[in-house]
Image (spheres, helix red, strand yellow):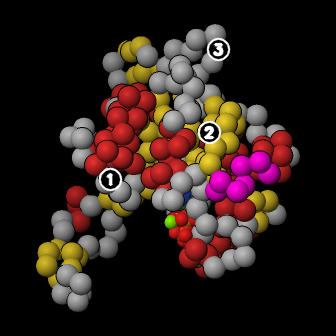
Amino acid sequence: MKQNHPGSFFIIMADGELKITAVIPAGGSGRRMQASEAKQYLLLDGIPLLVHTLRSFQESPVIGNIILVVPPADVARIQSDLVDAFAMTKIRRVVAGGKARQDSVRNGLAVLPADCEIVLIHDAARPFVSPALIEKAVNGAVREGAVAAGVRARDTVKQCDREGRVTATLDREQIWMAQTPQAFHRAIIVAAHQKAQIDNFYGTDDALLVERMGIPVRMIDSIPDNMKITTAEDLAWAEYRFSIRK
Ligand code: CTP
Ligand code: MG
């Protein structure tokens, strides 16, 4: 990586190959969706939700290759039904996920290509990610080491006890809601996941694992619509968003 002029960076390519890998955790079962199959395979605008997500990475010029993490039982069929059928040529490996999302991401990190320098992690369940947001996250990681996409809080956030009694009101100016993509220098995110595993610590996102190492994480503004599809209502909303885009 080399600085071009102050404030502007670009990534050197060796033999035309970008050294940036996307790890896409799609190893969940989508319990809250209450559908007959895992939510990442449900159709959205006629194609599996996961394909929408993967297409942004396939189209992004900054992404060299993709590691897709799926439920263990699906590894073989995903290779033919999805990777080949939808010509996802950047998918380098399809690997089995683990019990928690964090285990799935760790399984993906375990098979990073040797020359990979920047790792971008993005939930399969966020199909509205754009090539522009991917590029912003990658550039942020190159500059800062660790970044997470997020949105600034619109509502006032109250911290409460288990009975719902307010214990503190957080300063809204300082509150962000974290999403993915999150992007990191390879050494940072690999070390953070290793330490979490040693400590048996489970966090709700990858940035937290980096934070607990004392390494700063910078938030970057996400795009509208980059929400995670969790419930049937979310899927209906996503279907509507696609319908009005046309
Ligand atoms: N994920 C994963 N491995 C797991 C659990 C989750 O790779 N063991 C992935 C999901 O497939 C999803 C992303 O992590 O793309 C975010 O997780 P979430 O939205 O919670 O999905 P699920 O765990 O599948 O849904 P639920 O929590 O409702 O069961
Ligand atoms: Mg989950």
Q: For mark 1, what is the residue?
A: 200
Q: Which amino acid does label 1 sit on?
A: Asn
The answer to whether residue 218 is magenta is: no
Q: Which residue is drawn at 52% across and 50% down?
A: 104
Task: Name the residue nearer the viewer: 233 or 172.
Answer: 233
Q: Callout 2 environment at 10 Å: few (<14), some (14 to 19), or many (20+)? A: many
Task: Name the residue nearer the viewer: 57 or 204.
Answer: 204
Residue 176 percent location from the top left of the image: 32, 59
Rendered image quadrant of residue 167: bottom left
Residue 109 percent location from the top left of the image: 50, 37
In the displayed structure, does residue 245 sit left or right of residue 107?
A: right
- Which segment did they paint magenta? 71-77
The answer to whether residue 73 is magenta is: yes
Q: What residue type is labelled 3?
A: Gly
Judged by its main secondary structure, the magenta piece is helix
Q: For mark 2, what is the residue?
A: 67
Mark 2 or mark 3: which comes first in sequence? 3
Q: For mark 3, what is the residue?
A: 16
Q: Nearer the viewer, mark 1 or mark 3?
A: 1
Residue 76 percent location from the top left of the image: 77, 48
**Residue 135 visible in the snapshot:** no
Residue 50 percent location from the top left of the image: 68, 55
User: Do tag 1 and tag 2 residues touch (Cβ < 8 Å)?
Assistant: no
SS at mark 3 in the image: loop
Indicate which disc residue 221 carries.
none
In the displayed structure, does residue 125 sit left or right of residue 140?
A: right
Q: Which of marks 2 and 3 is in front?
A: 2
